[in-house]
C-alpha cells in the first residue's frame, strides 16, 4: 500500500500570529486517531513561521514541511535556507520545483534535481512538483512536458532513492484558478508518471511511489479525485489556509 498524503502549501501567507491561529484551529478538530493510519498530513508554512509551527506541532502526528531549500550547505548565499536549518525544526518534507518557483525564479529541472539529491542525502522527503501550462496543454504537449520534467528531476536517482520521493502533479492551469483537472484527466497523467517511473526502475518501485495531485483541490472535488487508482493524495494551496476546508479534504480519505 502506498502512503496517502495531504499536504498544505501555505505559499507566502500566514505570519507568526496567523500561523498560530490556523494551526490551533486545525488541531482542535483534527482527530488523527480516527484517520486511516496510512494517511500522512503535512503543512508547509513560510520559512519565518516554521519555528512557530514546529513548537505547536511538536507532539502531533501532523508533519512539518518547507516550501524550498538551498542546494548549498552554508555560507555566503544571501536569502537562502539550508537543509540543516530545516532539520533543526524537524521538517520531514520539502516541496521542490513548484511551478511558481519554475516560473518566477527560473528554476530548472537540473537545479530541482540537485535539491532532490540534497534532501534525500539528509533523509527528508522531497515533494517534487511537475505540471504543464495551459498553452502546453492546448498544444497537446502535456505528456511530452511531463516526461521531460520527470526525467530531469529524477536524473541519476537509484531505486532506493526513488522509493523515498513523492511526486506532485500540478497542472499550472489548475493552480489558484478554481479549475481543477477532472478525476479522469488527473488519473491519466498520474498513470503516465507511474509508467515513466517503472521504466526508470521496476514495477515494485514505481508502485510504491506516492503521486499526489494539486490544483484547485477543495472539499467539493477531493472525494472523486482520491477515488482514482493512481491519485495518492493532494498538495493543497488556497483551501489549506481555511481549517474547515483543509479538514474536510483530509476526511475525504
Ligand atoms: P491551489 O490549491 O490554490 O490551486 O494551489 C495549488 C498549489 O499550487 C499547491 O502547491
Image (spheres, rainbow, N blue to C red):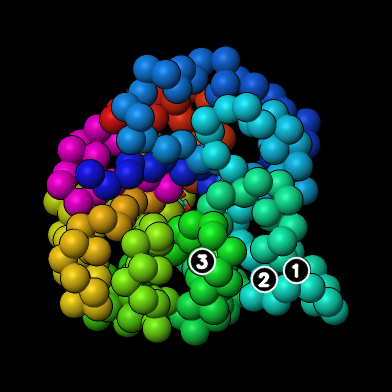
Residue found at x 32% / y 27%: 36
Q: Can residue 29 be seen in this view?
A: yes
Distance from Cα at disc 1 to Cα at disc 3: 18 Å
How many marks are shown on the rendered structure?
3
Give the number of the disc on residue 120: 3
- Local crowd size for mark 1, using a 10 Å CA cut-off: few (<14), some (14–19), many (≥20): some
Query: 21 left or right of 157?
Result: right
Q: What element carries label 3?
A: helix
Find out if the beta carbon at label 2 lies less than 8 Å from the nearest ligand 1 atom: no
Is residue 2 or residue 222 the one in the foreground? 2
Q: Is mark 2 on a helix, strand or loop?
A: loop
Q: Which of marks 1 and 3 is in front?
A: 3
Residue found at x 64% / y 75%: 71
Which segment is the magenta one?
222-235
Please say if 23 is above or below 186: above
Residue 35's spot in the image, x, y percent?
36, 23
* Residue 118: quarter of image: bottom right
Residue found at x 38% / y 42%: 5
Is residue 57 or residue 159 the one in the foreground? 159
The C terminus sits in image quarter:
top left
Distance from Cα at disc 1 to Cα at disc 2: 6 Å
From the image, tell me which residue sits under label 1.
80
From the image, tell me which residue sits under label 2.
70
Amino acid at each position: 500500500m502506498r502512503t496517502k498524503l495531504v499536504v498544505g502549501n501555505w505559499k507566502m501567507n500566514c505570519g507568526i500570529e496567523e500561523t498560530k491561529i490556523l494551526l490551533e484551529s486545525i488541531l482542535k478538530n483534527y482527530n488523527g486517531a480516527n484517520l486511516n493510519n496510512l494517511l500522512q498530513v503535512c503543512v508547509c508554512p513560510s520559512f519565518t513561521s516554521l519555528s512557530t509551527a514546529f513548537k505547536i506541532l511538536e507532539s502531533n502526528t501532523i508533519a512539518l514541511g518547507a516550501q524550498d531549500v538551498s542546494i548549498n550547505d552554508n555560507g555566503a548565499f544571501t536569502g537562502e535556507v539550508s537543509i540543516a536549518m530545516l532539520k533543526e525544526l524537524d521538517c520531514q518534507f520539502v516541496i521542490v520545483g513548484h511551478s511558481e518557483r519554475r516560473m518566477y525564479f527560473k528554476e530548472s529541472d537540473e537545479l530541482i534535481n540537485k535539491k532532490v539529491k540534497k534532501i534525500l542525502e539528509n533523509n527528508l522527503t522531497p515533494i517534487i512538483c511537475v505540471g504543464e501550462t495551459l498553452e502546453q496543454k492546448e498544444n497537446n504537449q502535456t505528456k511530452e512536458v511531463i516526461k521531460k520534467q520527470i526525467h530531469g528531476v529524477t536524473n541519476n536517482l537509484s531505486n532506493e532513492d526513488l522509493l523515498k520521493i513523492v511526486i506532485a502533479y500540478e497542472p499550472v492551469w489548475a493552480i489558484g484558478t478554481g479549475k481543477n483537472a477532472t478525476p479522469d484527466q488527473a488519473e491519466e497523467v498520474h498513470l503516465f508518471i507511474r509508467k515513466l517511473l517503472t521504466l526508470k526502475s521496476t514495477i515494485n518501485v514505481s508502485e510504491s511511489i506516492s503521486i499526489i495531485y494539486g490544483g484547485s483541490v477543495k472539499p467539493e472535488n477531493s472525494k472523486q479525485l482520491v477515488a482514482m487508482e493512481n491519485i495518492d493524495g493532494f498538495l493543497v494551496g488556497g483551501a489549506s489556509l481555511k481549517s474547515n476546508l483543509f479538514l474536510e479534504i483530509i476526511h475525504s480519505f
